[in-house]
Image (tube, helix red, strand yellow):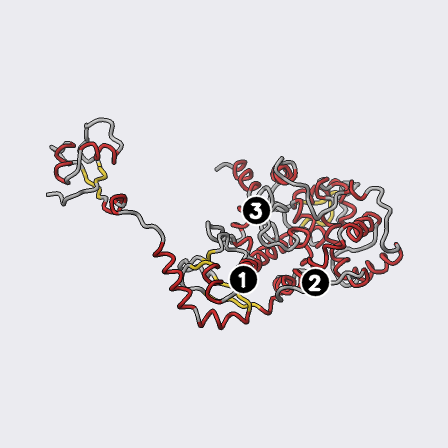
Amino acid sequence: MNKFLFLLFFSISVFSQQENNSKNTDRDTILIENDSIINPVKESYFSDRELDIIDSLLINQKFNSSLIDTLEYVIDDIDIIGNTNKTLTTDLLKTRLASLNSKTPFDLEFNPALEKVINSYLLRRKKYYPALMAKAKYFFPMFEQYLDQYDIPLEMKYLAIVESALRPRIKSRVGATGLWQFMYGTGIEFDLKVSSYVDERQDPVKSTIAACKYLSQLFTIFGDWDLALAAYNSGPGNVRKAIKRSGGFKNYWNIRPYLPRETAGYVPAFYATMYIFEYASEHNIYSDLPKFFNFQTDTIQIKRTIGLDQISEKINIDEEVLTELNPSYKLDIIPYVKDRNYALRLPSNKVVEFLDKEKEIYALADADDASREKPLPKYFEMDQRIRYKVQSGDYLGKIANKFGVRVSELKRWNGLKTSRLKIGQRLSVYPRKIGS
């Protein structure tokens, strides 16, 4: 495959918010106004021309497709222009942002654009946050565990809200899937397996680990978490170009005018979400009660293919609960595959009951399998096929007689339009008697 075809394939298999960076080998520099060279970007995995191709395809795929809906969570600039409604004073917001800024490596300094986004969220979306916060009580402790493991700021957990509103099974019109919105090819690059039964992009743990790996790559490139966040959405190539076009600035707000128009609201949405979660009570926003906390669940390795409905029937648990706790199983079936450890997540108070009734559950699965319609013997002849090698003196009638079949059947089985045979030719035969 030539280089361009590789780039084309690669660009189709990216995050809805990213490109894969694992194969880039060149280095790049940032130019300032006097054309001197300062502080090279640490890593760049493709040349500028290649990044132009990748980024343009990425943006076209994500935003310009007739299939894509407008982003539901991110507010476009056009929606905040002229917005003068406020739910808090500018001075109070400045004070609170300064307090947050002192606790995080993100750049949360006040600016009027961010103020408008925060006020827009508080005015238009306040009623949605209690349910969102309830989901966060389940997911955030797990996110934080892996963010800490990969030395990523814990505040990056808010990125999953911007990406998916914490819905593990959400899928965009272009195929980005899961809490962290992986495209198919990029998921494979980060070892997220996808099959007819399982989509690990929808697995909260495995997809979080993959997102941590990608974010770590982006930070290695830019050395700045705000720019890593921007690159997660628009691609590292677009961020590098924005840095150059700005004259070498590396503060997100200074390069924002040079980023793709469609991504300008992405980082402000992240900042606004962080602010609202951190100051929720000050705005009279309180979480709903979550269905589960993460520590109230546990996993069990299964020993055969079973359906969530079969589990639900035997241990008296709502199938919707099982689906919610096991979002990676596309058909609500947990497959048993050698060397692939597929597990069942249950409420902790149901684990003992499952173990007590495990044999009953597997017996139910066996019975359901046995009740399915089986192929009739007369339609099951494929298992009896032999491959016969044509020898000197053979002809179709002789071979048909040898195996107790008809010449017309030999022709049909082998797609023969004539009766001519070649010595050494292989024929598929479904014999009714043993050849002699």
Numbered tag placed on residue 183 in the rendering: 3
Which secondary structure, mark 1? loop
Q: Nearer the viewer, mark 2 or mark 1?
A: 1
| Relative side of 214 to 392, left or right | right
Disc 1 marks a residue whose amino acid type is Asp
Report the Cα–Cα distance between label 1 and label 3: 31 Å
The residue under label 2 is 288
| Relative side of 27 to 244, left or right | left
User: x, y percentage for residue 165?
Assistant: 66, 53
User: Mark 2 vs mark 1: which is more N-terminal?
Assistant: 2
Q: Quadrant of residue 404?
A: top left
The residue under label 1 is 318
Report the Cα–Cα distance between label 2 and label 1: 21 Å
Res. 51 in view: no
Marks 2,1: beta carbons within 8 A: no
Report the Cα–Cα distance between label 3 and label 2: 31 Å
Disc 2 marks a residue whose amino acid type is Asp
Which secondary structure, mark 2? loop
Q: Nearer the viewer, mark 3 or mark 2?
A: 2
Q: Quadrant of residue 79?
A: top right
Q: Quadrant of residue 366?
A: bottom left
